[in-house]
Image (cartoon, rainbow, N blue to C red):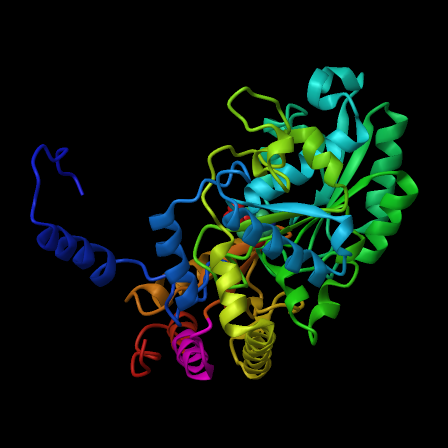
Amino acid sequence: MNNPLPENPSDPCEVLDRIFREMVDKGFHVPSANYFGLMNPTPTYIGVMAEALVAALNPQLATVKRSQIASKIEHETVRWIGERVGWLKSDFSGTFTSGGNEANFTGLALALAAKFPSFIDDGAVSTGAQPVFYASGEAHHSIDKSAGLLGIGRKALRRIPVNEHIQLDLDRLKQAITNDRRLGSLPFCVVATAGTTNSGAIDDLVAIAEICRQQNLWLHVDGAYGGAAVFSDQHRHLVHGIELADSITIDPHKWLAVPLAAGVILTRYPEMLERVFAVAAPYMPKAAEARGIDNSRISTQWTRRMNSLKLWLTLEVHGRQAYEEHIDHQMKLAQSFVTWLKSSVYFELATPQLLPIIAFRLKPNGMNHEQLASKHAQIVDQVTRDGTRWISETRVAGKSVLRMMVISYLTEEGHLTALQQSLESVATALIHGPGQGATAPL
Ligand SMILES: *Cc1c(COP(=O)(O)O)cnc(C)c1O
């Protein structure tokens, strides 16, 4: 991929052959059943169709007037998600985003606008002191980024250590709020995570909501991945309390298995979305001309593609019940992997398993953190080397873990068994020396 810019046309079949060879034959296959990776799914077929349709029809979501049906479908999809959260139709608003990053950014902007009414017009300086907010040490880095971009500075984020369940520690949260107030800073928000990226931990949403209520803080729940549990009747309890949030991030392009990109921000304070984003401009149709809220008044984006059709079509074609089964199936596979870990000679669960994300490790047997981390890196390297499958190494609360998650709806028990065999065989060779594991398939 080091060619000069093409000046002249080429035969499209030849070019497509070339790109297929690169991207299909040699590419990294996120939609594989053996991708135990980060949160990118195998997209639904109808979702892929939706993407082609959207590309061809090219609806411009900025204004209702120029997108009509597309905007209506989008509003309906947002409403379905909010109703699954447990909110009443008339009480919330939201919009599709490019993903969790933009949704979290928006959630923090809403929090600032709600707690400091002149923030949007007059800027951070109008608050008179340093606004600060809280999230666990395991929360996603998009909130650091957002704090920087929103002008309150990355240091405004107080990262609160986690407890043994990898949840934001509530006592330390309360202490930090008290300390900050005493020092003259202005606490305005808590970002609770429903499904951390590293290990799938879920903060105590009900308790955090109560602290936010007492302390007059905005509660944003980052459920980019785990928030989708609201689509399951059986597993909804995992994110119990999510309905108490002031704003919520849910990414359909994660657990709901639609193609990239689709995130959603929802809020119980529709007027805050407009406070943050509505700007008048002469080329915009007057509000009175159109029915329904223009996306540009509630979103960071102006020109925006239709990110909702792939979810809308998936729901229309398969029904919510398909997500019920999809989520349950992945939960069962995760539990089966945990059962295997319990019987494993070499490996053990490193953090509690709640969602289909499993943080595990070599049994330390006297190894220190650094030795363990280095062994984990070697294991990942060897298990993934031939390109059959993908797992990763990460750190939870500072400690090295191996990480796998079930994210593809194509993944079945057999894929887990093959991964387990590969892990056992690599660990045998690593611990007892080369030759020992060589007969087992890598
Ligand atoms: C993936 C993720 C994000 C970021 O979402 P993108 O869609 O990748 O921008 C934010 N928070 C959590 C907890 C995530 O897992």
Task: State the extent of the magenta-drawn residues as a range.
Answer: 409-424
Residue farthest front in this picture: 289
**Number of numbered discs overlaid on the protein picture:** 0
Q: Is residue 209 visible?
A: yes
- Whether 97 is drawn above or below 390: the answer is above
Classify residue 313 as left or right of residue 222: left
What residue do we see at 67% from left, 40% from top? Answer: 107
Q: Quadrant of residue 159?
A: top right
Q: Quadrant of residue 145?
A: top right
What residue do we see at 22% from left, 59% from top? Answer: 26
* Majority secondary structure in the magenta region: helix
Query: In the image, residue 354 lies at what x, y percent?
Result: 66, 69
What residue do we see at 88% from left, 29% from top? Answer: 181
Q: Quadrant location of the C terminus? A: bottom left
Query: In the image, residue 94 lies at what x, y percent?
Result: 65, 46
**Nearest to the observer: residue 175 or residue 5:** 5
**Nearest to the observer: residue 207 or residue 422:** 207
**Nearest to the observer: residue 62 or residue 14:** 62
Q: Is residue 168 visible?
A: no
Does 104 lie within the magenta span? no
Query: In the image, residue 81 lies at what x, y percent?
Result: 65, 58
Query: In the image, residue 65 lies at what x, y percent?
Result: 53, 38
Classify residue 1 as left or right of residue 178: left
Residue farthest right in this picture: 214
Classify residue 366 as left or right of residue 124: left
Classify residue 61 as left or right of residue 103: left
- Whether 128 is drawn above or below 183: the answer is above
Does 410 lie within the magenta span? yes
